[in-house]
Amino acid sequence: MSAEIEKKMAPVHIPVIAIDGPSGSGKGTIAHRVATRLGFHVLDSGALYRLLGAAAQRHAVAVDNEAALEVLAAHLDVQFLVDDQGEAQILLEGEDVTNAIRTEEAGRAASQVAALPRVRSALLARQQAFREVPGLVADGRDMGTVVFPAADLKIFLTASAEARAERRYRQLLEKGFDASLAALVEDIQARDDRDTQRSIAPLKPADTALVLDSTDLGIDAVVQRVFDAASAVPALAKYL
Ligand code: C5P
């Protein structure tokens, strides 16, 4: 076979940027900004765990019933759409749950179902399927360690629990919700503990991850650091 044909038949490399970190570190915002600039897809893996928590509630499955949750995860009927206004829309079993899965309660249920090993493996292939041309920015807790261990760039985005709770507090007030800052700090700490101490896929930086602390850094500065890091990776630099 000629070298040229062999080259044409070689699988196309689809680059991945993994952005992991605790709740409220700004991963979602950063992931979208980075993906928009590169023209890449986005995987919001936390949404899948939130959706599973919502499905469990809908079907009266307890958040610790691992066997039933594994089946539910394998058959999760979800659609990630964009509505007429260009806003992301998430459907669970045909119903719009875009806002419903963003509550603190949904986050708590997500982190409970996410601690179960069989649930995580049932959702693995679904997450990996988001890797499509031209590339993917994957946001979560174990993107760089488990789901995309060969990611082209791994970022671990963090911030103090107080700073993260305060951001969340402001977001809730802006949306017209009632909120208590003290309760949010407590909730974020409890979720951090559950995410970092679980035996399977705990939240931790991948060995080669670039750790960014956004406590005192604005969104633009964080995005710029990600682009600086991406420009040093040939598979990503060509999209910048
Ligand atoms: O990122 P988000 O806050 O939406 O995630 C909700 C919960 O889902 C997290 O607290 C975490 O327990 C779980 N999660 C996970 N692994 C991921 C993404 C989210 O365990 N890759």
Image (tube, rainbow, N blue to C red):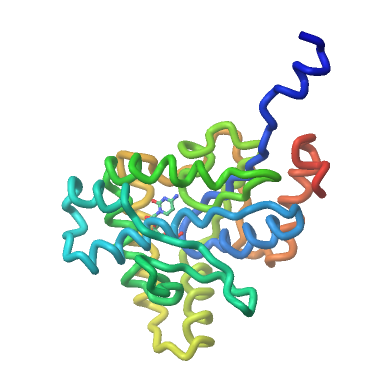
Say above or below: 189 vs 11. Answer: below
Question: Residue lying furthest top in this view?
Answer: 1
Q: Which residue is drawn at 76% across and 58% down?
A: 37
Q: Where is residue 177 in the image (x, y as percent from the top left)?
A: 43, 88
Q: Of residues 91 and 213, which is closer to you in this image?
A: 91
Q: Where is residue 160 in the image (x, y as percent from the top left)?
A: 51, 62
Q: Of residues 73 and 108, which is closer to you in this image?
A: 73
> Horizontal placement of 50 versus 172: left or right?
left
Q: Where is residue 191 in the image (x, y as percent from the top left)?
A: 35, 60
Q: Residue at x 38, y 73 (%)?
A: 95
Q: Which residue is drawn at 70% across and 56% down?
A: 34
> Horizontal placement of 9 versus 72: left or right?
right
The picture quadrant for ligand 1 comes to bottom left
> Horizontal placement of 51 versus 138: left or right?
left
Say above or below: 68 vs 188. Answer: above
Q: Which residue is drawn at 44% across and 76% down?
A: 99
Quadrant housing residue 94: bottom left
- Please count the marks in the image: 0
Q: Position of residue 133 (x, y in %)?
A: 67, 44
Quadrant housing residue 219: bottom right
Q: Of residues 79 and 58, which is closer to you in this image?
A: 79
Quadrant housing residue 88: bottom right
* Quarter occupied by the N terminus: top right
